[in-house]
Amino acid sequence: MNVLFISADLMFAPQLEAACRRHGAELVAVRRADALHRAPEAAAAILDLAMPGIQPEQVVAALRARGVAAIAAYGAHVQQALLEQARSAGCGLVLSRGQLHAQCDEVVGRLMGMVSAGS
């Protein structure tokens, strides 16, 4: 099972990759939201809201159209409006960057649980 990591900042990818492996999934990095059409099939996605010009509604719609069952989004805790946009767009988990970093394994586990529940 693939998990898309949609982020231009790949410094966090190794930690997420290890967490995904522990949960039986493979992390696939996508550096730009407009490159989703080239990404492999995935059951889940993690969306970085710090990407320049990100529009959560459009990205979530594109992910849903590709059959992605579970979506987590994260961003700066001070960007409440953007976090709320992600929540309203249908992201099942919306977290601050600090929460994702501190609880990475738990968050990936919750995402995998959301995929299983949707199956």
Image (cartoon, rainbow, N blue to C red):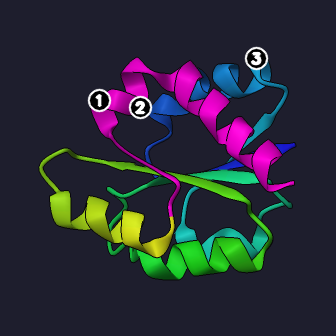
Tell me the distance, in whole angstroms, between the alpha carbons under discs 1 and 2: 5 Å
Kindly state the secondary structure of the residue where label 1 is placed. helix
Where residue 26 sits in the image (x, y, percent)?
80, 35
Residue 77: which disc?
none
Where residue 40 sits in the image (x, y, percent)?
84, 60
The disc labelled 3 sits on which kind of residue?
A: Arg
Whether the residues at callouts 1 and 2 have beta carbons within 8 Å, the answer is: yes
Residue at point 39%, 65% (across, down)? 86
Residue at point 53%, 54% (across, down)? 92
Residue 98: which disc?
1
Where residue 54 sits in the image (x, y, percent)?
38, 72
Residue 100: which disc?
2
Q: Residues within 10 Å of mark 2 (few under 14, many from 20)?
A: many
Whether the residues at callouts 1 and 3 have beta carbons within 8 Å, the answer is: no
Q: How many marks?
A: 3
What residue is shown with label 3? 22
Query: Is 118 on the left or on the right of 97, as rendered?
Result: right
Q: Most prominent secondary structure in the magenta stretch?
A: helix
Which tag, 2 or 3, sits closer to the chain's start?
Answer: 3
Magenta segment boundaries in residue numbering = 91-119
Whether the residues at callouts 2 and 3 have beta carbons within 8 Å, the answer is: no
Q: Quadrant of the C terminus?
A: bottom right
Please, is residue 102 above or below residue 80 in the view? above
Q: Quadrant of the N terminus?
A: top right
Task: Choose between 79 and 34: the one closer to the eye.
Answer: 79
Quarter of the view holding residue 14: top right
Please tell me whether residue 115 belongs to the stretch shown in magenta: yes
Task: Choose between 4 and 60: the one closer to the eye.
Answer: 60
Q: Residues within 10 Å of mark 3 (few under 14, many from 20)?
A: few
